[in-house]
Image (cartoon, rainbow, N blue to C red):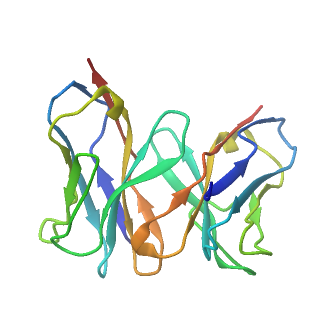
């Protein structure tokens, strides 16, 4: 079945460091891919998405490219801020609107 | 503000008690889901609905019931609470898969 595997955390970075959170997927067909962010005590918020191969999703300085050849959708940001501290979830949506979430990666950015 | 509203935000139950977690959305979304979030396990789908009158089971449906009498509301019922149901519960809705889910702010449930 479809699934998402993402990098184990927690991840701790200094402010202005480069961030990569790895995400790979297994899917039949042509899924859409998403990154969600969860701040403490809140629900998940959509961060960015890509709906087909080679699409790049971007938002708030974060980027991820849908790579069909490597079945990956890695999240990157060039310079993290303390306010980026949160839990990040990679997810895929199959053609039937079913979502599959990764286990989440906790990011802490220290000043 | 438009979105998904969950109540209550916090709840403590005794083992064996029943309760209903409420979820309402005002975006006219057809597809709604309930997830539970547990440490190290990500989000697991409990039940979902593709429209009023239609519900189906997800990955972990045991001990939970749902109904969907209107497009707006999708309550989750715990029939006889168990400590294993201690978790954070999220309701989410979606209109078109390309836009992703809109999540509620969650209900933190503790069963003692």
Query: Relative to B74, does residue B112 appear above or below in the rendering?
Result: above
Residue A73: x %, y % from top left = 22, 59
Q: Quadrant of residue A24?
A: bottom left
Image quadrant where one finds the N terminus of chain B: bottom right
**Callout count:** 0
Query: Relative to A82, does residue B13 appear above or below in the rendering?
Result: below
Along the line of sight, the residue nearer the viewer: B63 or A109: A109
Residue B62: x %, y % from top left = 70, 60
Q: Residue furthest front?
A: B1
Q: Quadrant of residue B8?
A: top right
Name the residue at 61% across, 64% down: B33
Q: Quadrant of residue A64?
A: bottom left
Query: Relative to B6, does residue B76 appear above or below in the rendering?
Result: below
Name the residue at 21% across, 24% down: A15
The answer to whether A20 appears left or right of B6 in the picture is left
The answer to whether B51 appears left or right of A43 in the picture is right
Residue B19: x %, y % from top left = 84, 49
Q: Residue furthest top?
A: A111
Image quadrant where one finds the C terminus of chain B: top right
Residue A100: x %, y % from top left = 43, 63
Q: Residue furthest right?
A: B17
Query: Relative to A101, does residue A81 appear above or below in the rendering?
Result: above
Name the residue at 29% across, 73% down: A51
């Amino acid at each position: 079945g479809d699934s998402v595997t993402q990098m184990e955390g927690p991840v701790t970075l200094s402010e202005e460091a480069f961030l990569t959170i790895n995400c790979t997927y297994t899917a039949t067909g042509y899924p859409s891919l998403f990154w969600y962010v969860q701040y403490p005590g809140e629900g998940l918020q959509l961060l960015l998405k890509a709906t087909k191969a080679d699409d790049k999703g971007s938002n708030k300085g974060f980027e991820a490219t849908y790579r069909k050849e490597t079945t990956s959708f890695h999240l990157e940001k060039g310079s993290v801020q303390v306010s980026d501290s949160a839990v990040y979830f990679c997810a895929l949506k199959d053609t039937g609107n079913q979502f599959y979430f990764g286990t989440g990666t906790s990011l802490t950015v220290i000043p | 503000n438009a979105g998904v509203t969950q109540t209550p935000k916090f709840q403590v139950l005794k083992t064996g008690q029943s309760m209903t977690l409420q979820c309402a959305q005002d975006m006219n979304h057809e597809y709604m889901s309930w997830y539970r979030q547990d440490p190290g396990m990500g989000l697991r789908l409990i039940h979902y609905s593709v429209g009023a009158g239609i519900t189906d089971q997800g990955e972990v449906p045991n001990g939970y019931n749902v109904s969907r009498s209107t497009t707006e509301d999708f309550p989750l019922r715990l029939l006889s609470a168990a400590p294993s149901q201690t978790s954070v519960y999220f309701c989410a809705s979606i209109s078109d898969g390309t836009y992703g889910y809109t999540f509620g702010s969650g209900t933190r449930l503790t069963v003692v």
